[in-house]
Image (tube, rainbow, N blue to C red):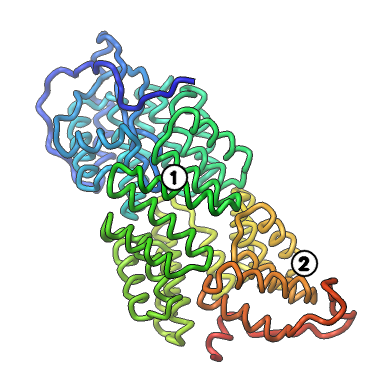
Amino acid sequence: METEKPGAAGERAASPAAERAPALGPAGSVARLLDGIAEERPRGRGLRRALVGAVAGAAVLGGVLVCVLVPGSGERAAPPAPGPAGRALAAAGTGVPAALPDLAALIGEREAHLRAHPGDDQSWAVLGSAYVEQGTRTGDFMAYPKAEQALRASLRARPEGNVEALAGLAALAGARHDYRAARTWGERAARLAPKRWMTYPVLIDAYRGLGDAKGVARSLAALQKLRSGAPVMARAGTVYRDRGWREDAAAALADAAALAESPAERAAALHRVGELAWERGEPAQALRYAEAALAADPGQPPALAAKGRALAALGRTSQALQAYRSALATWPEPRYALELGELYESLKLMPAARAQYDLVRARVRDAGRGGVNDERVLGLFEADHGDAEAAVGRLRAEFARHGSPENADALGWALHRAGDPEAGLKLAERAMKKGPRSALFAYHRGEIERELGRYGAARRHLTEALRVNPYFSPLGAAAARDALQALGEPPEGGPAEVYAPPGAPVPKLPTPRKAAAAR
């Protein structure tokens, strides 16, 4: 199959010259632009159609702005002049995340153009996808409603064959963690343009979120036939990690970093290599990669949080706290607030921990206003630090929507915490069978088995959790060590499973939260 070369578009049909209107500010800009559609009919229907480059789709590890090659219709914007907006589109042509200032310039340029030409479906798709990338890269969740308005305006202007708007909506749904919608939009885009490589990274992420390993494999195979280079290596590394192929994952992500064409792309790949090191229980290596990612792209919040995680494991607590606070200052990610709260709690700094726990709920609410689904994070938080029954309700609904191993583990743990360990164990077993090798999964399963009196299995899985990563959680890792100490050495007679006799009391330990307070 011949590889499609992104960015190699034919001549673009130029729009009639028109004076650019001033760029709109971020607040309410799309709504005001949309008002103009009803007032001006699309012009230029008689112009010769041409192949044009538009922006819509998914790039590597956080970037979603890429060029596509599709036939267009209606009004068309002239190619951006050389400068920040042009650089953003040029970067997108190879699947490279645009520099944030260039991305902002592109947004302003497209907003201004659409004031004068509200029927330009391509520019609506460009604008919508640029909003998606801005929200994904900066944590500005309120960019997502603007993105949806712009992408749907593109579909209204060209309902048929509008692959760039469909792909943009797929990327938007993925950014919001709505993987069912991402799969629907992505599959529609792939049917329209099966050789468009930029659709397949979005589909890979959607299938991963749904726990569909076969869909992931199909999409990765299609992507690898159509494209090579850093974006493909990065997606392949993520898939290999999910399959438990850690060495292959590390090699693919290291290649992605070496082949990266921009600082942001290199930083994203280095961050993922560091995440693999962290999952293997190698905090010094994880710290090295986090610092390399920050050297490539200073201030990157995921790398800052990864740095905080590694520093805490290495006992450099004050630096860890500072790294987490820096990440949260620029990125309202609920998961980072939860990690920081648990770090404070492990240090017996309960007022600071409670402040972060309050922040978890607030940030989930804020993200929800942008359409972002953070139910799994909130469910895990409630299971350990709040209302376990409420956690079960949230996570049951989330697992029905997105049956990933991560959601199976979270629901299983919440059921255990709410007093139903039998049901919880079934889900914990499913998570470990279908998901990556995870210290957290093993810990949750071991604790559930201990509750049920399955002491041999509990001992094995708690030991596995600490073998995989003895630092996996400042509260959970300590609770796993306490549980193993309470279980003691295995009885003589071999590795056969040992159950509590009927009616015998099951050894209990404090919850991770209470255990940390007692220490």
Nearer to me, 474 or 188 = 474
Quadrant where the C terminus sits is bottom right
Give the mark toward the camera: 2 or 1. 1
Q: Given the current orientation, which residue lies at the most extreme left position?
A: 19
Report which residue position mark 1 lands on.
Answer: 234
Rendered image quadrant of residue 161 = top left
Q: Which one is earlier in the sequence, the residue at label 2 or at label 1? A: 1
Q: Position of residue 14 (x, y in %)?
A: 19, 18
Q: Is residue 409 left or right of residue 181?
A: right
304 to 165, vertically: above or below: below
Residue 332 visible within the image = no
134 to 203, vertically: above or below: below
> Tag 1: residue type?
Ala
Query: Residue visible at 59% across and 60% down?
Result: 394
Q: Secondary structure at mark 1?
A: helix
Mark 2 surroundings: few (<14), some (14-19) or many (≥20) residues within 10 A: some
Residue 428 visible within the image = yes
Report which residue position mark 2 lands on.
Answer: 422
Mark 1 surroundings: few (<14), some (14-19) or many (≥20) residues within 10 A: many
> Tag 2: residue type?
Glu
